[in-house]
Image (spheres, grey):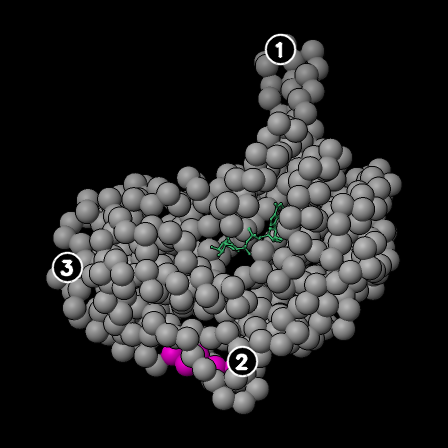
């Protein structure tokens, strides 16, 4: 199967005529081909977006809402196909794609379709003198670049608010997981999205991504991916004065206090560590446990991790599927090796998994728990982005906070305690953009989403995204 770009309402082959191999991580085999597009395809997409912009920005809000709703319905109608494609492309368990990824993509469109009906701008009165009102106008052409870990989920999280606010979009999914973005282009056509409003250009980050970021007609960039890529994007976009939102990596702390609900905490911290093979920027990859319950927690945690089954993503019993790619699998294994060199003790996991049958050449890794590492060592400081987590005891709240805040990242944290006063205090002091107390990944789409420090700049979600994709203009009228 050769995937195609979606430009100016049509499905097109890349100008180069070349394709990239698209691997199924569970089998290690090529199963489709992703367009190897370049700046010429981006140029076509930008021209299509420019031509569509005046009409789309002036489209009645209700009409815009209806089109986005139809896109949501279109995904929902083909749920099984999307679920299968997402699991096959990324390696995640089918049941996870069915429970989380694809329903969330549907929700993203519905959420922003309805949000735009309620979005309002401010007015500021100067009593007896003047009234100011703020116009919120679409920025123009938005570039949306997304990663491979939650492919359609994150792709639509950017596209939906950009379109809802009247922008036209040039979007690039990860070349590692392009399939559901291709299916989305079919849905757009069926939903009657006017041509040129959304253009999807597949290909490498260094070619297509870079061309999007460099293009002078693309005024706003929303990116989710690695911190190094984010730096590069910022360096290109800043001198061009583009608006940018960067959702980058994380090395999220999980703080477990002795007064937590023990059983529920163990269970949820396992989920927070290993969901999606640990390939979620929000996963808790450093667990700090109050000394008085450290051994008890460690033993219960490891016992639970040992129950997790790594297996064929198609099997309902698999808790962890395949790692997204061979290079990423090697990267994770090299960190496990490093952890041992740094003095870490592997409590469980630590090895590649070799499955029988269909998946015998897939990229699998056991869920891995490591203890005995200094909180400043590389394993505890660098983003691994896989099924690997560390356990470290702490004595006091201050010590827990020092360790939690010691990394360059600042995306998310979770705190497990029944002391409400402490929870509030810690939430205030954690250097992150998102804090979950006694829960993890509980998402309300209205809330601001994003990180601080090397985890990025800007916020998405709710009004934040609608503000990001619009340019405020103040109009002052003298009375
Ligand atoms: O991401 P990249 P990679 C982290 C994780 C992982 C590391 C690298 O630690 O090991 O990042 O992963 C496009 N201009 N996260 O290499 O390269 C690319 O094509 C414009 C965390 O896969 O950042 C893809 O569409 N775009 C993360 C997207 O950027 C460029 C999720 C992300 O790819 C580009 C994924 C360029 N110069 C990885 N170079 C999270 N925060 O959720 C690449 N791209």
The image quarter containing residue 99 is bottom right
**Quadrant (top left, top right, bottom left, bottom right) of the C terminus:** top right
Vertical position of residue 398 compared to residue 308: above or below = above
Say whether disc 1 or disc 3 marks the residue closer to the N-terminus. 1
Is residue 451 visible from the viewing direction of this image?
A: no
- Sort mark 1 into few (<14), some (14-19) or many (20+) by Cα contacts within 10 Å: few
Reading the image, the residue beneath label 3 is 291
Q: CA distance from mark 1 to mark 2?
A: 75 Å
Query: Looking at the image, is mark 2 or mark 3 nearer the viewer?
Result: 2
Residue lying at 46% horizontally and 66% vertically, measured from the top left: 330
Q: Which mark is residue 128?
A: 1
Does the segment drawn in magenta span residue 312?
yes
Query: Looking at the image, is mark 1 or mark 3 nearer the viewer?
Result: 3
**Quadrant (top left, top right, bottom left, bottom right) of the N terminus:** bottom right
- Magenta range is 308-313
Vertical position of residue 451 compared to residue 440: above or below = above
Q: Which mark is residue 117?
A: none
Q: CA distance from mark 1 to mark 3?
A: 64 Å
* Mark 3 within 8 Å of ligand 1, using the beta carbon: no
What element does badge 2 sit on?
loop
Mark 2 near mark 3, Cβ–Cβ under 8 Å? no
Q: Position of residue 34 (x, y in %)?
A: 72, 63
Residue lying at 49% horizontally and 63% vertically, measured from the top left: 328
- Sort mark 3 into few (<14), some (14-19) or many (20+) by Cα contacts within 10 Å: some
Reading the image, the residue beneath label 2 is 361
């Amino acid at each position: 199967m050769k995937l195609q770009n979606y430009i100016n309402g049509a499905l097109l082959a890349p100008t180069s005529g070349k394709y990239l191999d698209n691997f199924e991580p569970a089998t290690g085999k090529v199963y489709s081909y992703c367009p190897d597009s370049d700046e010429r395809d981006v140029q076509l997409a930008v021209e299509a977006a420019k031509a569509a912009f005046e009409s789309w920005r002036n489209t009645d809000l209700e009409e815009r809402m209806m089109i986005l709703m139809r896109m949501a319905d279109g995904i929902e109608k083909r749920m099984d196909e999307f679920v299968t494609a997402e699991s096959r492309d990324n390696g995640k368990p089918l049941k996870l794609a069915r429970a989380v990824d694809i329903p969330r993509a549907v929700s993203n469109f519905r959420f922003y379709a309805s949000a735009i009906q309620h979005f309002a701008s401010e007015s500021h009165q100067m009593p007896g003198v003047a009234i100011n009102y703020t116009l919120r106008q679409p920025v123009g052409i938005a570039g949306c670049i997304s990663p491979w870990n939650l492919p359609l989920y994150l792709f639509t999280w950017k596209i939906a608010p950009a379109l809802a606010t009247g922008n036209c979009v040039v979007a690039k999914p990860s070349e590692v997981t392009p399939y559901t973005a291709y299916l989305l282009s079919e849905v757009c056509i069926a939903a009657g999205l006017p041509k040129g409003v959304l253009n999807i250009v597949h290909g490498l980050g260094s070619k297509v991504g870079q061309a999007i970021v460099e293009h002078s007609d693309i005024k706003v960039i929303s990116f989710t991916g690695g911190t190094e890529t984010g730096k590069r994007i910022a360096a290109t976009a800043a001198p061009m004065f583009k608006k940018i939102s960067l959702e980058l990596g994380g090395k999220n702390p999980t703080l477990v206090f002795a007064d937590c609900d023990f059983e529920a905490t163990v269970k949820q911290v396992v989920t927070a560590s290993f969901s999606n093979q640990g390939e979620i920027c929000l996963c808790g990859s450093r667990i700090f446990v109050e000394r008085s319950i450290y051994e008890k927690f460690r033993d219960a945690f490891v016992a639970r991790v040992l129950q997790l089954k790594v297996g064929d993503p198609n099997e309902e019993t698999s808790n962890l599927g395949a790692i997204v790619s061979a290079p990423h699998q090697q990267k994770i294994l090299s960190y496990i090796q490093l952890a041992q060199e740094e003095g870490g003790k592997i409590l469980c996991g630590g090895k590649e998994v070799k499955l029988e049958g269909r998946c015998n050449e897939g990229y699998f890794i056991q869920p891995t728990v490591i203890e005995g590492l200094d909180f400043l060592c590389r394993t505890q400081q660098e983003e691994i982005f896989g099924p690997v987590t560390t356990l470290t005891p702490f004595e006091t709240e201050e010590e827990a906070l020092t360790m939690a805040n010691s990394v360059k990242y600042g995306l998310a944290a979770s705190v497990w305690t029944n002391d409400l006063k402490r929870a509030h205090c810690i939430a205030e002091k954690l250097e992150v953009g998102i804090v979950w107390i006694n829960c993890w990944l509980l998402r309300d789409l209205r809330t601001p989403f994003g990180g601080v420090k090397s985890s990025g700049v800007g916020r998405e979600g709710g009004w934040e995204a609608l503000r990001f994709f619009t340019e405020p203009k103040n109009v002052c009228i003298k009375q």
